[in-house]
Image (spheres, grey):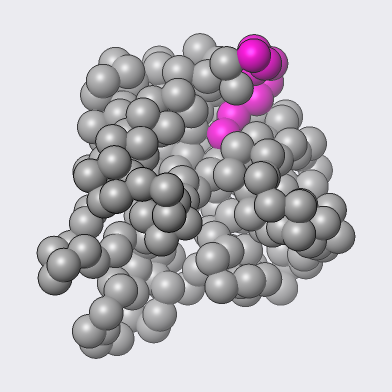
Amino acid sequence: MAENVASEDASVVTSLPDVSERSDLDFAGWKAWFVLAARRVIAWTPPHGVAIFFQSDIRHEETLVDKSHLVMRAADEEGASLLWHKIVCRRPPGTISFGRPSWSHMLCVAHVPRKTPKKPGPDVLPDAGFMPWSRAMGVRACEVACAYLRDEVEARVVVDPFCGRGTVLAVANAMGLDALGVELSAKRCRAARALVVDVARDR
């Protein structure tokens, strides 16, 4: 990202990797990396664009790790503002979970505060929507994020620097937006290129 300046009509929708996906780092190292990576994503976003993070909390040694807190640490360090914070249910509301929490956070941050949305979306999504793979953001959650970019930010390019198998990219394309993803895994890149979703079924 440091070598490629964002276009003025770009915004980011992404999910940063869990500690389980960074086997080269211990837990403390991963937390430091997570905050730094989030800072770089925010810093890369153009002045009038936004960065939307979709993050699921984890447990480490019986302690809950609140990833929304890590994203906000990064935003504070970059002098960015929180525009909105939504909760996305990964399992039906009321589910009792003894392991990984059954919700995810979706946070939108920006360099410049924005007016109240003309078409505000839900604060709580009771269903993330169809998930093309186990780590996917969920089509419904992607649709809410991309609708905000299209209607409120007037973004035309959606960038996901940790795109996995491309759910965000496929939803952005289905909603008439251009999309660009970055992924280290060649297998996931092939899956992302082939993925097509029907956003209408999750409306």
Residue 22 belongs to magenta span: no
Quick one: 116 or 88, which is closer to the camera? 88
Q: Position of residue 188 (x, y in %)?
A: 72, 58
Q: Position of residue 14 (x, y in %)?
A: 53, 44
Residue 171 shown left or right of residue 62 in the figure: right
Look at 40% across and 17% down and name the residue there: 111
Look at 64% across and 14% down and name the residue there: 3
**Residue 159, image quadrant:** top right
Which stretch appears magenta? 3-12
Look at 36% across and 29% down and name the residue there: 36
Residue 193 shown left or right of residue 51 in the figure: right
Residue 107 seen: yes
Q: What residue occupies the far right of the structure in this picture? A: 194
Majority SS type along the magenta span: loop
Q: What residue occupies the far front of the structure in this picture? A: 24
**Residue 7, image quadrant:** top right
Look at 86% across and 60% down and name the residue there: 194
Residue 174 seen: no
Q: Position of residue 1 (x, y in %)?
A: 60, 22
**Residue 88, image quadrant:** bottom left
Which quarter of the rendered picture does the C terminus lie within?
bottom right
In this view, 151 is above or below 132: above
Quick one: 193 or 102, which is closer to the camera? 193
Count of numbered labels shown in the rendering: 0
Q: Position of residue 17 (x, y in %)?
A: 46, 51
Quick one: 30 or 59, which is closer to the camera? 30
